[in-house]
Image (tube, helix red, strand yellow):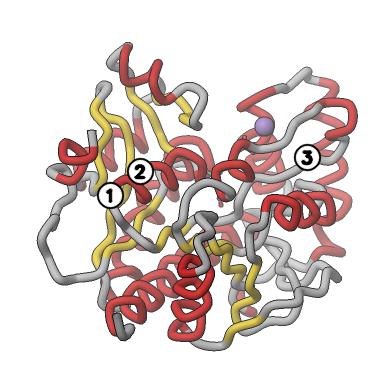
Amino acid sequence: MVEQLLSKIQNPKSEIPQVALESTVIAHGLPSPHNLETARACESAVRESGASPATIGIIAGEPVIGLSETQVQEIASRTDVAKVNLANLGAIIAQRRWGATTVASSLYFAAQAGIQVFATGGIGGVHRGAADSFDISADLTALARFPVVTVCAGAKAILDLPKTMEVLETLGVPVVGYQTDELPAFYSRSSGWELDLRADSPAEIAAIAAEHWRLGFTTSVLVVAPVPVADEVSADELRDEIEAALIAATKQNITGKSVTPFLLSRVAARTEGRALRANIALLKNNARIAGQIAVAFSKQEP
Ligand code: PSU
Ligand code: MN
């Protein structure tokens, strides 16, 4: 499986450091045409940092690490693309279906392929009301399993952030603020949750991750980078919209894999696109930082 996967990376032997990118955000996270535009912009942001992007997806049952432009287009436009985590990955491949990788399954493939850095928007986490619904994203247990630096803008604001942080701590996943002392809250830069780890440069992140793995730990290192100031939507402004979206989800009986896409699209629609703009901006920002971290890894002393 590993060799088979490695042969599918566009530059398997290249010296250029690679950054893995996910595809659920393309298929289920952003509306058309922003999904395709953002996928392209994230790949460009990785390249501008001096690294090479590898967007991951399942094309008719074939896992591909480094989707071609046409494949990204198909993932963005088809309506039969499954949201793939670790529980359904085998089945999607066996049934020759199309799949978009979440943080969980992207981390799996990145680790298999030896890619050290991965970028997403916001990780999944513990949902509000999880005590009743038991809805805790498979992203969290995947972060505990795969030794890949994950760059995000925190967990999505629709989640229960304190509970998400508690689970990450329990799982032994370091959460490092990138140029911040506070956990960012996806659309907004602040959450009120103080972090105990901070790094101010890509080289510092690479050093922290290298030491974490040298100790024998095999978890992800989660880098949390705030959305750029110009595109931020404040948590105060979004509070009511998020509450309303959660109530609508319950009323409409939205469960399982549909919860996150439903909430994100509802909040985007109700904020005149401002939440959407923030989401796009943070995705590009994270891709850029991930590229810089990949370059920093390649410059590290062995
Ligand atoms: N970041 C975004 N938008 C998204 C996601 C991340 O800005 O849609 C996706 C990721 O693929 C993540 C998934 O793994 O949302 C989480 O889904 P769930 O809460 O159902 O586990
Ligand atoms: Mn869920």
Question: In terms of sequence position, does the residue under pointer 3 or pointer 2 come before the other?
Answer: 2
Split into quadrants, the picture shows ligand 1 in the one at: top right
In this view, the residue farthest toward the front is 215
Foreground mark, 3 or 1, reads: 1
Ligand 2 is within 8 Å of the C-beta of the residue at disc 3: yes
Question: In terms of sequence position, does the residue under pointer 3 or pointer 1 come before the other?
Answer: 1
Which secondary structure lies at badge 1? helix
Q: Quadrant of residue 173?
A: bottom right
Q: Amino acid at mark 2?
A: Phe
Distance from disc 1 to disc 2, alpha carbons, whole Å, reads 6 Å
Q: Residue 142: x and y, percent?
A: 55, 43
Residue 249 in the image: above or below residue 217: above
Q: Amino acid at mark 3?
A: His
Q: Which residue is mark 1?
A: 113
Q: Quadrant of residue 168?
A: bottom right
Distance from disc 3 to disc 2, alpha carbons, whole Å, reads 25 Å
Say if residue 161 shows up in the picture: yes
Which secondary structure lies at badge 2? helix
Q: Is residue 139 left or right of residue 50?
A: right
- Label 1 close to label 2 by CB (< 8 Å): yes
- For the point 76% across and 57% down, the residue is 165
Ligand 1 is within 8 Å of the C-beta of the residue at disc 2: no
Front-most of residues 143 and 286: 143
Q: Which residue is mark 2?
A: 109
Q: Is residue 229 left or right of residue 104?
A: right
Residue 211 in the image: above or below residue 96: below
Which secondary structure lies at badge 3? loop
- Label 3 close to label 2 by CB (< 8 Å): no
Q: Which residue is mark 3?
A: 127
Q: Amino acid at mark 1?
A: Ala
Q: Residue 36: x and y, percent?
A: 36, 48
